[in-house]
Image (cartoon, grey):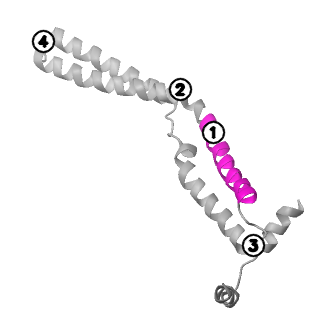
Amino acid sequence: MSDLYAIFTQSGGFVLFALAAALFVAAAVFMPLWRGEKAQSNSEGHEDVTLYRAQIAAIDRDLQRGTIDPDEAARARTEVARRLLAADRHAARAQTADTRGRQRGAALMAALVLIGGSFALYISLGAPAYRDLPLAERIARGDEL
């Protein structure tokens, strides 16, 4: 614990700046995972599917009564079927919204591992105990060499 205190006190603002930069980068990278996709309510998706199925049935009734051409009925049925498939896919995605919590957990764990791992590498491989050398002292050492 005293080593961490020494690192923070001796390296000044660098460690705080590096930590803030790492948090900013982690937030930028993992924010899309955290937000995920906004789920539509299951009842709303079910209502859309029911509506499109009723429209297909109405097109079939109109075709049997002779109020629309067979070509027009085929085009309308194709368009409604396309919308029905899209609504069904959207409703299925809404049912899998419970995976959102797992995505958030994975994003949080990955951010913690990356930031913690970077800090651990800096402590083990870096030189956190060295103080900064003023410019005059660096020039004097260069002249000596």
105 lies above or below 49? below
Mark 3 vs 1, N-terminal side: 3
Residue at x 71%, y 74% (from the top left corner):
13
40 lies above or below 51? below
At label 4, which amino acid type do we have? Gly
**How far is mark 4 from mark 1, CA to CA?**
58 Å
Q: Quadrant of the N terminus?
A: bottom right
Q: Are marks 3 and 1 in contact (CB under 8 Å)?
A: no
Question: Which residue occupies the extreme top position in the image?
Answer: 64
Dot 3 alpha-carbon crowd within 10 angstroms: few under 14, some 14 to 19, many 20 or more = some
> What residue is shown with label 4?
66
Measuring from the top left, give residue 36's x and y in whole percent: 53, 41
Mark 2 vs 1, N-terminal side: 2
Residue at x 59%, y 54% (from the top left corner):
27
Measuring from the top left, give residue 29's x and y in whole percent: 54, 51
At label 3, which amino acid type do we have? Ser
Q: At numbered mark 4, what does the secondary structure look like: helix, strand or loop? A: loop
> What residue is shown with label 1?
106
Foreground residue among 117 and 62: 117
> What residue is shown with label 2?
95
> What residue is shown with label 3?
11
Q: Which one is in front in this view, the residue at disc 3 or the one at disc 1?
A: 3
Dot 1 alpha-carbon crowd within 10 angstroms: few under 14, some 14 to 19, many 20 or more = some
Mark 4 vs 1, N-terminal side: 4
